Every structure is written in C-alpha cells, then in structure tokens.
Image (tube, helix red, strand yellow):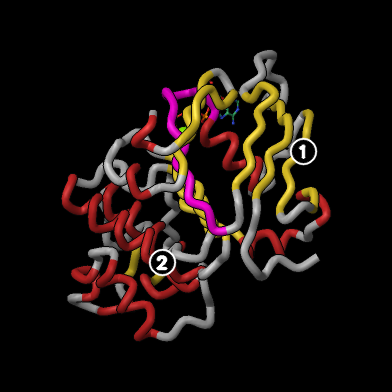
Amino acid sequence: PALSEQIAVNIDHVSFSYPNQPVSVLNDISLSVQPGEKIALLGRTGCGKSTLLQLITRAWDCSQGEIRLNDMPLPAFDEATLRQATGVVSQRVHVFSSTLRDNLKIANDQATDLELKTVLEQVGLGKLLEDTGLNAWLGDGGRPLSGGEQRRLGIARALLHRSPLLLLDEPTEGLDADTEKQILELIMQHCQHKTLILITHRLQGLDKMDRVCVMENGQIVEQGHHAKL
Ligand code: ATP
Ligand code: MG
C-alpha cells in the first residue's frame, strides 16, 4: 500500500527486547496518534523512547504486538514506501564525507540549490555557505560541525524530506534556549498538516503540542495536554 496522505500511527500492545538481552525495553505499550496530531514523548533516560521510534521505522521489529500506519501493519509496507513517508531526526545525526549539498540531498534528491540554501538559512546554518557554498566539504577531512550544527543539519534534512510523518528524537538537544525556540517554531510551522512525534527532555514548546505522553519502564504512564499534566 501507498502512504501519501496524512498518517495515523497505532502502537498496539507492543513489547520489545533487543536481541540477546534478557530485559524487555518496551512492555505492552499502546499509543494511538491521530492523522496530523502532534505529540511529545517524555521520560527519563533509558526508558525506551528512542527504541520506540526505531520500531516505527522498522529498524527493529516488535517482539509482541504490532504497529500500524493508517491501519496497515508495518510489515505490509515496502521499505521505500516507509522511508519516503517518515522523516527522522535520530539522536545522533550522521554527517557523510561529502559536500554540504550531498549531505542535504540524501533527504530529497529533487531539491534545487535555492531550496537547499533557504532551508540552511531557516535552521541557522547559513554561515556554512560562506566560503564555498553548497560545495563545502563535510565529514572526514572537511569542515567539522559542532553537536548543535549536526542537529540542525538533521532538522534541515527532515524539512527537505517533506514526509507526512515526522519522528524527531531530541532535535534541539544542545541548542541554546533562543535557538531552540526558533527551531521548534520552524518545525511546528512545517508540520501543520503532518503527524509529529517529538522526543524531548525539555519543557520548552510543550504547550504547542496536542498531547504530551510520559514514558516510564517501557510504558506510557501519563498523557494529556501540557496544561493539565
Ligand atoms: P535517552 O533519553 O537517554 O535517549 P531513551 O529513552 O531513548 O533514553 P533507549 O535508547 O530507547 O532510551 O534505551 C532503552 C534501553 O534499551 C536502555 O536500557 C538501553 O541501554 C537499551 N538499548 C538501547 N539500544 C540498545 C541496543 N542497540 N542493544 C541493546 N540494548 C539497547
Ligand atoms: Mg533516546
């Protein structure tokens, strides 16, 4: 099946343990995200947030239970369809040893140089364009990027990808409060009609989300609007 319109995510009684690990990371977790809904996922370090996101991208398969997109179980989709439908900023953004242009175009090979430059300015990476523009070399032997710059590169990719489902794993970690506010606003603007799952440790911007879900021991233990939690 195709996945072009808005996407609903259904996490249905999912349990998961990593291969050859005795302890289970996710324990019968259930969570339904409506098409176009924006939710924040909070919880202590190690409670399983990133693992849950990785199950949605099928980096791993559930040990029990299932995850559905628009009521179809994940294994029903082919890999390319899933990749096209989900924009991911993982906790560690990978920088390829290649040009700035290539590092962005892996998210969208149709994007024009003008679009790439616009997105770079939006995420505050305009200064990378100063010397050699989009030909600037990154990665090994290239211009080193700070942690915050890597994160913004990840966000630029997610914006270029234009997928109906966005999965962001602490996209503003390591950014100062002002930059964080700007980036969150940019993300929310971009996501108006998209489904968003945002993992965060920070409280900034939670009021803009439709729902905040708190994880503990591989389960959702509390959820609701930020103002009511
Ligand atoms: P943080 O807020 O620190 O990012 P998290 O909620 O994202 O934490 P996860 O990364 O999902 O937590 O990790 C949940 C548990 O799974 C942890 O105990 C971690 O040690 C374990 N874990 C994570 N990745 C692997 C892996 N590849 N193999 C085995 N265990 C793993
Ligand atoms: Mg994590």
Q: Secondary structure at mark 1?
A: strand
Residue at mark 1:
66
| Farthest-out residue, top | 22
Q: Residue at horizontal 72%, vertical 20%? A: 20
Taking the magenta stretch, the answer to whether it contains residue 40 is yes
The vertical placement of 158 against 196, above or below, is below
Q: Residue at horizontal 45%, vertical 47%? A: 210
For the residue with label 1, is its CB less than 8 Å from the closest atom of ligand 1?
no
Q: Amino acid at mark 2?
A: His
- The one nearer the camera, 100 or 221, is 221
Badge 2: few (under 14), some or many (20 or more) residues near its Cα, within 10 Å? few
Contact check, label 1 and label 2, Cβ < 8 Å: no
Q: Which mark is residue 190?
A: 2
Left or right? Give the position of 189 relative to 63: left
Magenta range is 36-48
Place residue 30 in its image quadrant.
Answer: top right
- The one nearer the camera, 215 or 113, is 215
The vertical placement of 223 against 23, above or below, is below
Residue 90 visible in the shown view: no
Taking the magenta stretch, the answer to whether it contains residue 12 is no
The vertical placement of 147 against 105, above or below, is above
Image coords of residue 15 (percent x, y):
71, 26
Image coords of residue 6 (percent x, y):
62, 64
